[in-house]
Image: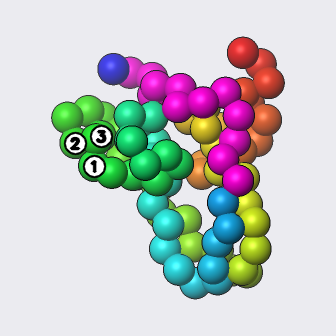
Amino acid sequence: MTTPEIAQKAPFQVDVEAGRSYWWCACGQSKRQPFCDGSHKAGPFVPVEYKPAETGTVWMCGCKRTGNQPLCDGTHNTF
């Protein structure tokens, strides 16, 4: 696999806590989207750590093709 699987064609709304680490699934195979569950181990993708500076709500990429990993940049609108 050279491109990640599309988990969904919309971002995931995630409530985050400042300073906590969140591991975003980059391969699209995780059953715990948008977070990594280790499904990538047989492929070329690795999870991306996200450590927010502020507590709040963020939109994590669901199509796995964002240019701003792990946050959505609207790339899913091009499908």
Residue at the left extreme of this rendering:
42
Q: Which residues are magenta?
A: 2-13
Farthest residue, direction bottom:
19
Q: Which residue is mark 2?
A: 41
The image shows a total of numbered marks equal to: 3
Binning the other alpha carbons within 10 Å of mark 1 as few (below 14), some (14 to 19) or many (20 upward) gives some
- Up the image or down, 64 lies above or below 23; here it is above
Q: Vertically, is 64 above or below 58?
A: above
Q: Residue at x 77, y 19 (%)?
A: 78
Q: Amino acid at mark 2?
A: Lys
Identify the mark at residue 38; answer none if there is no mark: 1
Q: Which residue is mark 3?
A: 40
Question: Mark 2 falls on what kind of element?
Answer: helix
- Viewer-nearest residue: 52 or 2: 52
Residue that appears at 73% across and 60% down = 58
Marks 3 and 2, how far apart at CA = 4 Å
CB atoms of marks 1 and 2 within 8 Å: yes
Queried whether the magenta region covers residue 50, the answer comes back as: no
Q: What amino acid type is highlighted by mark number 3?
A: His
Q: Main secondary structure of the magenta part?
A: loop
In the image, residue 37 lies at what x, y percent?
33, 51
- How would you rate the neighbour count of disc 2 (Cα within 10 Å): few for under 14, some for 14-19, many for 20 or more? few
Q: Mark 3 and 1 residues: CB-CB less than 8 Å, in contact?
A: yes
